[in-house]
Amino acid sequence: MPVSISPSEIRRNASRISGLTGDVRQVQRELGTQYRQVGEFWTGTASKTLQSEYPGLDGEIKALIRSLERLESGVERVASQVQRAEQERAEKKRLAEKLAAEKRERERKEQEERARSRQR
């Protein structure tokens, strides 16, 4: 049996990714604040380590944010494609039902015509 997932379910996942992106941004802001505060008050090895490591960490966080944004965008695209496919499937079903109804109507009329022909 095929598994079905709705576009709204997929969009909920994209929204969750967006929330994660927001969380990572919040952590980035907090780390930036801590970095600036530590730079003002700390001295010595710990301060130097933080000063040298933070830019690399911040770069990794930015890369993570970009990756999450791309992931969210990709999931949104999938949701749109699934929605389009569902609409196309529904339209094809509607058309098939219409054609089947028209065929039944033609066959009914043909039977009536044959019955009238036999009565004459």
Image (cartoon, grey):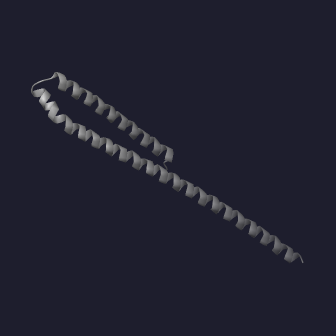
**Image mark count:** 0
108 left or right of 49?
right
Instruction: Identify the residue shown where x is 30% and y is 31%.
Output: 29
> Image quadrant of residue 55?
top left
Q: Can you say whether 54 is above or below 67 in the image? A: above
Check the picture and name the quadrant holding the C terminus: bottom right
Position in image of residue 1 (x %, y %):
49, 54
Q: Can you say whether 57 is above or below 120 in the image? A: above
Position in image of residue 13 (x %, y %):
43, 42
Instruction: Identify the residue shown where x is 22% and y is 27%.
Output: 36
Q: Residue furthest right?
A: 120
Most foreground residue, 107 or 76: 76
43 left or right of 79?
left
Q: Residue furthest top?
A: 41
Instruction: Identify the residue shown where x is 20% and y is 34%.
Output: 54
Most foreground residue, 40 or 56: 40
Most foreground residue, 107 or 63: 63
Position in image of residue 67 (x %, y %):
32, 45
Is there any visible trace of residue 72 in the rendered image?
yes
> Image quadrant of residue 119?
bottom right
